[in-house]
Amino acid sequence: MGSDLKPADTAAPSESGLIQQTLRQILLAPVYDVAKQTELSGLKKLSARLGVNVWLKREDQQPVHSFKLRGAYNKIHSLTPAQRSAGVVAASAGNHAQGVALSATRAGIRSVIVMPTTTPEIKVSAVRGHGGEVVLHGTSFDEAYAEAMRLSEQDGLTLVAPFDDAAVIAGQGTVGQELLQQKRDLDVVFVPVGGGGLIAGVAAYLKALAPHIKVVGVEPVDSACLQAALAAGEPVDLARVGLFADGVAVKRIGKACFDLARLCVDEVITVSSDEICAAVQDIYEDTRAIAEPAGALSLAGLKRYCQRESVAEQTQMAAILSGANINFHTLRYVSERCELGEGKEAVLAVTIPERQGAFLQFCRILGQRQITEFNYRLSGRDRANVFVGIRLKSHDELAQISAALTAQGYAHQDLSCDETAKLHVRYMVGGVPPEPLAERLYQLVFPERPGALEQFLTELGDRWNISLFHYRNHGAASGRVLLGMEVTAQERPELAQRLAALDMDYRDVTDSPAYRFFLRG
């Protein structure tokens, strides 16, 4: 998933002058009228795991929980008296909107924020809470931006750009100034890249005063606008961008940002959504902060860099946590994908013979490894295709599992990198059986521990054929299973006795409308 692009090392005098001019603007930026100096936190757990010293620049601690406040205020502070009297306008559905609203309110001037009509109410309320006048217009950012331009011309409002503006870049560059003040012996700094304002300012400051520090830009693999610009030699439009890390979902890097980035950025690394999810988890485990996907982007790049390079143990690395304005429901996706991003889980499609006891035999092949997910629905009488997740302890363990399955004649395929499988198919394994079944459906809860699924199947025995099975480990103390079994009316009392003997919570849910509608036919 990673790739590198390196800009030229030399700079003409005029280019050097551009860096020095940006440095002066950063040094004079009065951002602390509204922003705060954020902490540089050591990530002890991750440092021990990677074998380097990892530091996290906590821009989630800003009043708007994002670095965007810095650039917005610096731009507003630079306005002429006439411009301040008229007010400002911006188009944004995210962190920039809150930064402009709060900055304008602190400066005592009017702010109009144009947001798409699809913007979640929580973000609209946050902007209004910071004193901004919200105008809901259009269903996309482009339509909102066009309306902001119209209002700018109609009412004489100054447009505050989200990144492609010298004053905005300088405001964001104060993050680099703090980094150097807080940790002078840094070796590598990882910066998230969206429109480019943050990396342009940070890289310019660091290269002007500490050129030995390596500056690495980090982008999602599906939104790599800086990487594309470096390859083309100029800003270019991406055909499409991924929206998971919406804070950096930008089709084209800013021209002013690119002019600095091509001079001051040493390389660009791209990472996957799964790697970003794993970085969100790393940040939480070390700091208890919950980063938005774009906020965890730079740490994901740091981890990929450490995987790729032979990094000395005393290397000092810093990543910028750029924001923490996460949609709460996104956490469900993050929790599903973080183990895959860390290489701690694999998902497989396995074909097993359709016979009594086949599930148990399959679990015994896996040994004491923890099964994280098991999806199956009877679809034929000779063989069954199951979707299974397995927790891994090492990167070579998947090869061991594959060899064991092959030796026992189990055809299988690794789906860990199949986006369709991870996004959709894992939730769609099922359907109606090929023929009417004498089937009962049960929900069961049992203590969660390694080997628990195998023990459950062993105690259940192979008296009855399993026709449906769904299990997903969620890291809780108990595991939940949906179990379908072929059992005649005469056999039901015997099955009830067997389930009762298992000493676990269970209930018959055969009358579930969802089961009858989707799984029974």
Image (cartoon, helix red, strand yellow):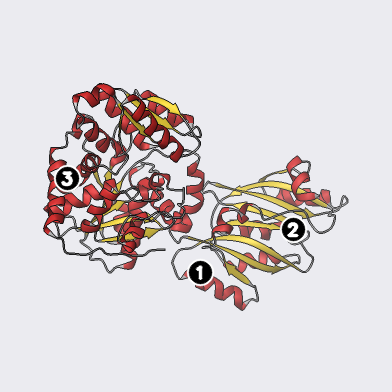
Mark 2 vs 3, N-terminal side: 3
- Is residue 310 in sight in this rendering? yes
Q: Earlier in the sequence, mark 2 or mark 1?
A: 1
Left or right: 449 in relation to 431? left
Question: Tag 3: residue type?
Answer: Gln
Q: Which image quarter holds the N terminus?
A: bottom left
Q: In this view, does 357 lie to the left or right of 77?
A: right
- What is the C-alpha distance between the residues marked 3 and 1? 44 Å
Instruction: Count up the numbered dots.
Output: 3
- How many angstroms separate mark 2 from mark 1 (CA)? 27 Å
Q: Where is residue 116 in the image (x, y as percent from the top left)?
A: 47, 34
- Residue under label 2, please give it: 466
What secondary structure is found at the residue carrying circle 2? strand
Q: Is label 3 in a helix, a strand or a loop?
A: helix
Answer with the quarter of the image where residue 509 lies.
top right
Q: Which residue is drawn at 60% across and 60% down?
A: 388
In primary-sequence order, the first of circles 3 and 1 is: 3
**Closer mark to the observer between disc 2 and disc 1:** 1
